[in-house]
Structures are given as structure tokens and as C-alpha cells.
Amino acid sequence: MMWRSLVSVVTVWLVVGVSLLQAQSGVSGNWEMRLDTQTGVTTWQARFEQNGDRLGGEIDLGDNEVLSVDGTVEGSVLKFVIVVPDLDGDQPINFEGEVVGDVIQGAEGSFSWYGTGAWEASRE
């Protein structure tokens, strides 16, 4: 009887531990981002690093432009900014989206000279 109780407790702790680890690294990994704006469809490669509620990483815009990500994650909602260097001054681009499985459904936004529109990302 005692062994059954011990096995039950260990099983519960393992399930809770795995769930916590998955929650901590929820969006960590490689993603393909797709912006659909007036200038057309643009595809970027992102590597997100989630540590608790902090979001970091980088986004590769192509043409040797790799920009840092600075943001937060609250539940399934993430918000982050990248700063695109420009001769007329740095251009911050803000992103907001909701993680649904292996997809991030992005909110409509303004993406500097890329125009306004929608974005989404898929886990690679």
C-alpha cells in the first residue's frame, strides 16, 4: 500500500516537473516568420529564447541583418520589439501575438518600411 502511494506521488511530481519545463521554454526554438503587408510577403527566420516571462533571441532578416529580440511572454501572449538600423534613425518594430501550439498568430501591426499588415510564425 505504501509503495502505491509513493509511486503516485513520484508520478505526479514528474508530470508537474515536465509541465513546468515546457512552460518555461514555451516559445524557445526556431521559427519561420511571415509578414503579409502592402509591399508583399516577407519571410524571416527567428530564434526565440524564453526564460520565464522574458523573451530574447534574434531574427534574421536576410542580407546579413540579424537583429536582437527583446520582449515578454504572459501566458500564451508574447510581445517583442526589434530595432532595425536606418540612416534616418533606428526603426523599432513592435510585434504582438498569441501562441497556439506550434503557430504564433500575430496581431496586425506596422512594420516600418515593410508597411502594415498581419504576421504569423511557425515552429521549425
Image: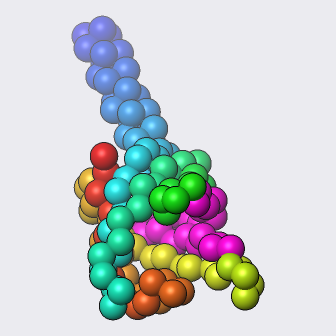
Camera-side residue: 119 or 78? 119
Residue 10 percent coordinates (x, y): 37, 21
The secondary structure that most of the magenta stretch takes on is strand
Answer whether residue 78 is magenta in the image: yes
Residue depicted at 51% across the width and 87% down the height: 113
Q: What residue is drawn where x is 50% and y is 52%?
A: 48
**Res. 19 in view:** yes
In the figure, residue 18 lies in which quadrant? top left
Quarter placement of the N terminus: top left
Residue 81 percent coordinates (x, y):
59, 72
In-front residue for pair 95/6 = 95
Give the image location of residue 37, x and y in percent. 34, 85
> Does residue 46 sit above or below 24 in this rendering?
below
Q: Give me the residue at 45% from left, 38% from top.
A: 21
Is residue 23 among the parts visible in the rendering? no
Residue 72 part of the magenta segment: yes
* Quadrant in the picture for residue 118: bottom left
For the residue pair 11 and 102, the one nearer the viewer reads as 102
As drawn, 78 above or below 123: below
> The magenta stretch spans which residues?
65-85
Say left or right for 11 vs 86: left
